[in-house]
Structures are given as structure tokens and as C-alpha cells.
Image: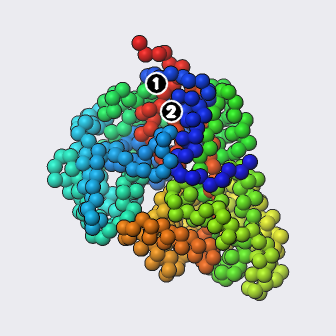
Amino acid sequence: MRRGRAAALLLAAALVLSSCGAGGGGGSDEPVGDPRPGGSLVWQLPAEVSTDLNPLESSDPSATGLISGSVYGKLLDWRTGPDVTEMELEGDLAESWEVSEDGLTYTFRLRRDVTWHDVEPVNGRPFVADDVVATITAMKERGLQAYMLEAVRTVQAPDEHTVVLTLDRPFAPLLEYVAYHTFLIVPREGIEGRYDLDTVAIGTGPFLLAEHTPDVEWVLRRNPDYHVPDRPYLDEVRRPVINDTAATTAALRSGRLDVGTTSDVTVADEFRDGDHTVVETPGAPVSFYLNPRVEPFDDVRVRRAVSLAIDWEGMGETIRGSFNLTSILRPDISDAALSEDEVREIRPFDPEQARRLLAEAGLPDGFATTLLVQRVDDEDVREAQWMQADLAEVGIDVTIETVDPGTGIERRRTHEFAMTKALRTVHLPDQTWRDFMPGYIENYALVDDRELVEGYARTRTTTDDAERRELHRAMQRRMETEIVQGLFPIQKFDYTIFSSRTQDLFPVPIHQGRRLADVWLSDQPASP
């Protein structure tokens, strides 16, 4: 059962609401009434946070998924909800923003009704512009967000509720980065070192980080001073750490878990019943890298032969069930992504052409090589076995080496592989292309292409949306046909399974924990 490419961000979530009655995200087609306050939502956390919680340092997706939007706020956010079918920005801590005609001045007008969590040493004081200045300055100087702000020259606060960023050149992705889930605003006390950002999370979001039992559970509690009236509805959100499919399934069946996730379509199909709802959301792309320093992958004809010899579409349909056939950019995020038909045209499944290319490269009988596989779930290994079988058909004898995620990341960063596959969680086009720039730590396949570098620079400075879109499209074609060192050939789907009582929780590709303020449980007592 194959699904076509997602039309736009959150389209799947919009369809879910229309199929689930008033609540959305629940398992019943019957109307469930108005939102009711109270209750505890139990939502699986698929992996324990492996690093600290410091928003300036932590790139762990488990950490950002836990605290982004729910605990910490951002200046801007992506709109979410049943009526949203395109990427649209809206204010979060900023109520409005302006960009000068020359693209060099960004002015953010801040909300005046926001306070920080009532936790020492911040103690619920008002949120002001100095907090934003301190955070962005620290991001530029020592944060993982520095690359998002490389064009920003100054950060100033002309008054308590205005922040002005001055750039030294136009930088088209800036607003997208300001809304990104790692661009979290921190109290100036944290930036100044008056408490430990690694272990204490003080934000402006709808929930406070209340408890943590390592490898067992994180607990978020309702922020009684949240600036949105009557929100959040929930008293608490419990995030038990469950990374085993069987345990997740059992907890959902017993009612001990309200929300769980899986990438296994077979497991998801088991919950398509009256007691649960399954939502399919585009997830991380499958990433595949070829090392040009390892023979015979120093020959582009060999790299191209490998890409043509694998039936990527058949792999997605057989192993993932729901998937998007993709090039480099994610179709659920960017309208510059190539369509499935365009991908088939430039990267067809063509074993005969693969054999001809191998013969032209002096390898008519093929060769032997290895495939390093970063295993997160069983599907990762099954995909590798599919690739192994397809490549054997053109004479390429592949030995699979399976490693854990930490080892996989380290081996890719040190380029200790011939071929390697994993999942790559990048969202925005600017982030994606950064992966293929010379000298960047995540440039696993050692891409060093002058035309690609020049195209990337132009996508960052042009203010013409149409021009930027065509640049992205041309760069994808070049990656597929002329470079062929890094491919994101399919995008897997994730499956979120909801209990019937869970209402108004819409899974989205980019973390948006702020939406938890609107989630409610239909089995709570009705309001008087």
C-alpha cells in the first residue's frame, strides 16, 4: 500500500481531523464535545535524552522534541492545525515582525503578556527584549545555531518589547531558522550562568519540566501562568521512555499509553480500529552516501551505476509501506522538491544501464564492497538487505556491517566507510544543502563541487522566491546525475497511534510542542 508524495506540510494532519470528528487525533468518529480541562496525557518518548538540555548545545532530537515549544518558546513558529496545508509562519513570543526592503533589517515586536516560569532564580518575571538579545548573542558566539545567524551583524533592543537584527547581507532563510525548533529563547539569567542550563529548563511555554527518572520517564506539568487564556488544558504530560516495539504495542493495548509511535506499517495497521487512530506523517529521509576516496567510488560512473541498480521505489513500497520517492529536499517541507515523476526520470531503476556504466568504468564483472548500516529499527536492516540483493544483480557483491547510531555517526563523520545508509533528520532546504558543503562536519560523502557551492550561496542571498526555487531544483538534478555522492532516495513515513480519548494532537514533521497547550482528554469530567 504505497502513498504518494505529501502535497504540503500538515496535509495529513488536516485529513485526520476530518476523519475523527471534533477532536482530531482521537479514535472515534463521533463528536466528543468541547475541550475539557484536566488529566494526564501519557506519550511515548522513543529514546532517552542522550545529552544535556542546554538549548545552545543540545542537538539531540529527543531533547528538542521534549522541550521545544512545550517548555521553551520561540520568536516565531509554524502554523499548525486542520486548516493548514502550506508552510506558514506565525508569531509566538513575537506578535509581529517586519523585514526592510533591502533585506538587512529585521524588527520583532514582542508580546507584552508573557512571563517566565516561576522557578528560581527567574521567579516568573516578565519576558523582555533583553532576554532575546542575550539569547541570540550567545547563539552567535557559542551556540549550535551560529550558522543560522552568520549574516547577523548586530542584535539590539531599542525598548523592552522590540528587538532589531541588522544583517551585513541578505539572508533568505533567516525567518525559517527563527521559527525552527532549536531556536529557543532562554532567560538572560541562564545565559549569564546563574543556573545550570544543562539540567534546569526555565521557559515561557505551556508546561514546566517537573520530573525526570533516567531511562524511565520525563514529566511536564501545567504552567498556571501561561499567557494564552485557559491553556493548557492538560494538568500534565508524561513521557515514558519506551524504545521497544513490543512494549509500546502492549502499553497502547492496555491503555497505559495514550500516544505511541512506530515506523513499522505492520504494527500501525494492527491499531486501525475503533479504539485507536493511526496518523501517517512524513518522517526522516533514508540517506545513502558513497565515499569518493574509496575505489571504485572515485569514478562517478560507478556511483551512478549503484544509484540506478537499486529499486528504491520497490524498497519503499515493500519495507516502509508508506513513503515518498524523493531527491534531496523533503516534499512535505519545500515546494522546490522534485516530484516523483521527475525523480523517476533522472534516477530510474535501470539495471541494464548500471551494467553498461560499470563496463565503461572497467568493471564488467562488478566488484566487492561493504555497506555500513546505522540501525535504529528493523527496517534499516531490511532496506540494506534489499539494496544488497539489487546490487548483486549487476555484479556488485556487498557485505553489510550493522552498527549502533553513535558508531554510525562517528564512522560517517570520519569517512570510515565505502557505502553507508542511515536516516538523516534535516528539514529546511538551507540545512539540507549545508550537509554537502566542503569542510562541514556532516558532509559525510566529501562533496566538493564548485557549482553546488555557488548555487547554495545564491539561494541564501536572493530575495526572489521563484529564483531560489529553481536553484534548489537545479542543485538536486546535479546531485543525482553529476555528483552522486549523497542521496536521500526515499522519505519514510512515521505512524503515530492515538487512544480514543486523545483530542487535538496533530503530529507534524517539525517539532512544535506549543501545540500541546490545545490538547485535551475526552474522558475528563465536563466543565460546570
Q: What crowding class fits label 2: few (fewer than 14 Cα within 10 Å), some (14-19), or many (20 or more)?
A: many
Which amino acid type corresponds to the residue marked 1 in the rendered image?
Answer: Pro
Q: Quadrant of residue 17?
A: top right
Residue 521 position within the rendered picture, expressed as x and y whole percent measured from the top left: 51, 25
On screen, residue 86 above or below 514:
below
Q: Quadrant of the C terminus?
A: top left
Could you tell which of marks 2 and 1 lies nearer the N-terminus?
1
Q: Residue at x 56, y 57 (%)?
A: 331
Number of the label disc, if any, that sits on residue 277:
none
Residue 491 position within the rendered picture, expressed as x and y whole percent measured from the top left: 62, 56
Q: Which of 427 and 121 is in front in this view?
A: 427
Specify how the rendered protein is coloured.
Answer: rainbow
- Badges 2 and 1: C-beta atoms under 8 Å apart? yes
Residue underneath mark 1: 35
Number of the label disc, if any, that sits on residue 504:
2
Q: Check disc 1 and report its element: helix, strand or loop.
A: loop
Q: In this view, does 446 lie to the left or right of 312?
A: left
Q: What crowding class fits label 1: few (fewer than 14 Cα within 10 Å), some (14-19), or many (20 or more)?
A: some
Residue 457 position within the rendered picture, expressed as x and y whole percent measured from the top left: 42, 73
Examine the rendering and report whether any part of residue 350 can be seen.
yes
Q: Residue at x 76, y 53 (%)?
A: 318
